Image (cartoon, rainbow, N blue to C red):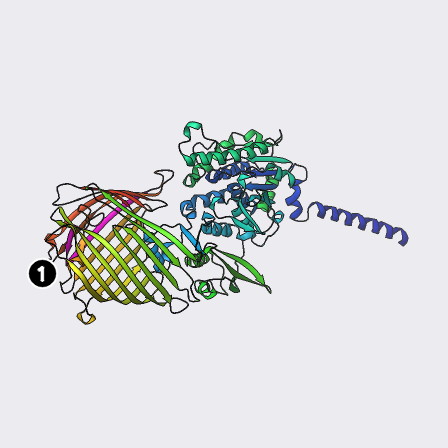
């Protein structure tokens, strides 16, 4: 009896074991359920082509694919397609992407200028005079950067958006297996990224040659993959896709009659080369595949302000293919399980146990560490980290400043990787100011600024500036910090300048006055922060001043010996010096010339300026400002008296038309930002304002009733060379107004 029962028990036990094993193999709690949708259907590969801003249409297409339960098993992307595809593969939904893309300040993202408020104070003043673009000087040769945009801001954005998968090295282990395509700059070969840093792969894939600096990965210098494989269909098949859904957002070729200049022809040639590889890829599609080319009209690859429109048009076009899209869909229950696997999981807070700086060859690591506010023991705060990296980047010696979350002995830490500029450490920048008005006055100034940096461990700099035009000369200063944090510094300098000034009698210009200056000085200074700087110094100079045209009754000065104690306190928190939106800028300066210094003229000038910018409803800005200048002893010689007149300085008067021992000026300006005035123009503003001021020779004569009222209207925009303004000014007591055209920064 016992012998017959035991086999039955064994058989029952075996069947139970087999059943449980089978059940678990089919449905191991959650994993099997998540994979159920893949058992009896073809694997779908999504191929997203490059096209710059037009690539945002991919997001609209994805929204429709998800609406009809289309599961994506592989994603392959090029250029902007790699950005959308990489984010989707990392677990981001189309709706999340749309929200992010609509909020990203794209024009700022592609400028790579550090925020003005974080710049070291002396660099703020540089940016008010000079173009952003710089050249390197190495071994006596001019060295060009490899791209206009290093990609600092774009790189951080991609790192931030892919932080949830930063520890994944194999792209097959992402929520959706992913590939990005770039091109090897040395060989012209396509490079398929299947491992490494996801954000670096995406960044390499959209490194447009000549625009973005190429990215080096695994010893290869990489650029935008669109030039070799803009719609990489065959790669999706190679990694396992049975069915392809391919989206092409490339810019259509222009008609011959639309090719107006050299730039148009160049872009057409690039388009022809890209279109050939796209045509080859499309030829590989079969009847079971789906090809969508969103109807994006005149949205260009650089029209990033039209990204919301591109997303909408991508969705609209995709809906025209709904009947075909439906055939790839799965049941709602299966798709729900698919999304549970694909969507990014909520990240646990990252505790930073240590902060390290990757070794650099020129900039002392302590200078970098001194800019980092993120400390060991804190939770990783991406906004705080972004400000940290911006402060390091604002030093001015780095091409990019990246971060990595690294592990060491079971702890997580922050590694700051500051890549020094290949074209440094000596730099050449240029600046230009140009003024023309309806009275026939035309003035220009061209600047060439040569800066030698990191001359010692404390970060000494030697700057030499050559200036040509209405005011010509040369200025050279050696800036030597006295400690690693640059709180204190000394700055010896030499200056030669020659300037030409207009002299007026009432409304008539009667003479031109030439002032030649040769001198030197020594300053002791303190950097209170990136916002404020104070200096006290000694000046010695020899000066000549005389009429050059007309003005036979004007005073003439020869071989004048000048010496003075000079003190300056400057504060600058403006967010922008083209059209500031927020912040305060103020300055107080004292020039005290004393007979004990062996001078020919002893006099004391005190000057104070103040400007505040306030923006409301994002587009409306109000500027309030005033400036006061006074000769304390009312003994200032003619060549150094205060002047008023010119654009935004009593705009209805000629430049320097008013001259005296004291001055006062108040302004109230308003301007409005037009986001979509022109496709190729950013930061376009229109505005106007009122000004009130005058000059006086005697303090006792200063009365409110003497104030001259002036008004102005203007329009302007920022560009690569310098901001361009056009305006009209008028003032009471004048017979006619003045039209202005001004190139250069005003605030």
Considering only vertical position in the picture, is 342 above or below 541?
A: above
Q: Is residue 243 left or right of residue 374?
A: right
Residue 355 image position (x, y, % from top left): 51, 64
Residue at 42% across, 51% down: 135
Q: Quadrant of residue 285?
A: top right
Is the magenta region chiefly helix, strand or loop?
strand
Foreground pick, 191 / 231: 191
Residue 360 image position (x, y, % from top left): 50, 61
Residue 661 image position (x, y, % from top left): 14, 59
Secondary structure beneath disc 1?
helix
Q: Is residue 259 left or right of residue 1?
A: left
**Range of magenta residues:** 656-674
Q: Quadrant of residue 635?
A: bottom left
Q: Is residue 709 left or right of residue 79?
A: left
* Residue 176 in view (yes/no): no
Foreground pick, 516 / 395: 516
* Residue where numbered disc 1 is placed: 700
Foreground pick, 295 / 113: 113
Q: Residues within 10 Å of mark 1 (few under 14, many from 20)?
A: few
Residue 480 image position (x, y, % from top left): 37, 66
* Residue 600 in view (yes/no): yes
Give the residue at the far bottom of this rendering. 596
């Amino acid at each position: 009896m016992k012998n017959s029962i035991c086999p039955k028990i064994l058989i029952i036990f075996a069947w139970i074991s087999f059943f449980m094993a089978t059940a678990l193999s089919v449905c191991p709690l959650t994993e099997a359920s998540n994979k159920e949708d893949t058992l009896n259907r073809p694997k779908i590969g999504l191929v997203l082509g490059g096209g710059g801003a037009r690539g945002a249409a991919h997001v609209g297409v994805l929204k429709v694919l998800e609406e009809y339960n289309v599961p994506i098993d592989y994603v392959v992307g090029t250029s902007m397609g790699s950005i959308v595809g990489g984010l989707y593969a990392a677990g981001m939904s189309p709706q999340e992407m749309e929200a992010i893309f609509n909020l990203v300040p794209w024009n700022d993202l592609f400028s790579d200028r550090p925020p003005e408020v974080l710049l070291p104070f002396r660099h703020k003043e540089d940016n008010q005079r000079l173009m952003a673009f710089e050249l390197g000087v190495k071994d006596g040769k001019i060295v060009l950067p490899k791209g206009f945009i290093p990609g600092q801001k774009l790189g951080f954005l991609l790192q931030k958006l892919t932080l949830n998968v930063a520890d994944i090295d194999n792209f097959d282990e992402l929520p959706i297996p992913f590939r990005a395509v770039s091109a090897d700059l040395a060989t012209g070969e396509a490079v398929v990224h299947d491992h490494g840093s996801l954000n670096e792969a995406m960044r390499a894939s959209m490194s447009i040659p000549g625009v973005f600096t190429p990215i080096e990965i695994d010893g290869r210098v990489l650029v935008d993959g669109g030039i070799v494989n803009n719609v990489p269909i065959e790669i999706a098949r190679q990694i396992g896709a049975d069915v392809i859904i391919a989206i092409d957002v490339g810019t259509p070729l222009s008609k011959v009659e639309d090719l107006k200049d050299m730039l148009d022809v160049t872009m057409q040639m690039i388009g022809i080369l890209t279109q050939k590889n796209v045509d080859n890829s499309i030829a590989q599609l079969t009847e079971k595949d789906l090809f969508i080319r969103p109807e994006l009209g005149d949205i260009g690859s650089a029209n990033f302000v039209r990204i919301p429109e591109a997303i909408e048009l991508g969705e609209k076009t995709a809906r025209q293919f709904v009947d075909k899209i439906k055939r790839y869909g799965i049941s709602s229950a299966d798709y729900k399980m698919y999304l549970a696997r694909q969507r990014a999981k909520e990240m646990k807070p990252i505790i930073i146990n240590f902060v390290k700086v990757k070794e650099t060859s020129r900039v002392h690591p302590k200078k970098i560490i001194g800019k980092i506010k993120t400390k060991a023991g804190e939770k990783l705060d991406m906004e705080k980290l972004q400000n940290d990296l911006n402060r390091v980047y604002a030093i001015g010696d780095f091409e990019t400043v990246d971060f990595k979350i690294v592990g060491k002995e079971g702890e997580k830490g922050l590694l700051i990787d500051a890549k020094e500029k290949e074209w440094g450490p000596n730099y050449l920048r240029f600046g230009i100011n140009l003024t023309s008005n309806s009275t026939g006055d035309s003035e220009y100034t061209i600047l060439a600024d040569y800066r030698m940096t990191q001359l010692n461990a404390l970060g000494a700099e030697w700057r030499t500036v050559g200036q040509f035009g209405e005011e010509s000369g040369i200025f050279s200063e050696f800036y030597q910090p006295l400690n690693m944090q640059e709180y204190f510094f000394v700055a010896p300098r030499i200056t030669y300048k020659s300037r030409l000034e207009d002299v007026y009698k009432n409304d008539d210009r009667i003479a031109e006055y030439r002032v030649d200056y040769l001198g030197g000085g020594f300053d002791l200074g303190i950097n209170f922060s990136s916002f404020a700087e104070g200096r006290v110094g000694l000046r010695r100079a020899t000066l000549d001043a005389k009429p050059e045209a007309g003005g036979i009754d004007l005073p003439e000065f020869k071989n004048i010996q000048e010496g003075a104690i000079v003190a300056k306190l400057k504060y600058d928190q403006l967010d922008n010096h083209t059209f500031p939106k927020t912040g305060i800028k103020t300055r107080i300066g004292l020039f005290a010339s004393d007979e004990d210094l062996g001078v020919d003229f002893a006099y004391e000038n005190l000057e104070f300026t103040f400007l505040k910018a306030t923006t409301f409803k994002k587009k409306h800005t109000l500027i309030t400002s005033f400036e006061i200048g006074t000769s304390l002893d009312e003994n200032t010689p003619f060549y150094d008296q205060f002047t008023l007149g010119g654009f935004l300085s009593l705009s209805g008067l000629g430049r320097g038309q008013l001259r005296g021992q004291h001055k006062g000026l108040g302004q109230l300006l308003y301007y409005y930002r037009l986001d979509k005035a022109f496709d190729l123009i950013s930061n376009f503003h229109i505005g106007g304002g009122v000004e009130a001021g005058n000059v006086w020779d005697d303090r006792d004569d200063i009365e409110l009733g003497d104030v001259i009222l002036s008004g102005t209207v203007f329009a302007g925009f920022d560009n690569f060379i310098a901001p361009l303004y056009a305006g009209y000014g008028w003032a009471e007591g004048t017979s006619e107004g003045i039209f202005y055209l001004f190139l250069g920064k005003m605030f």
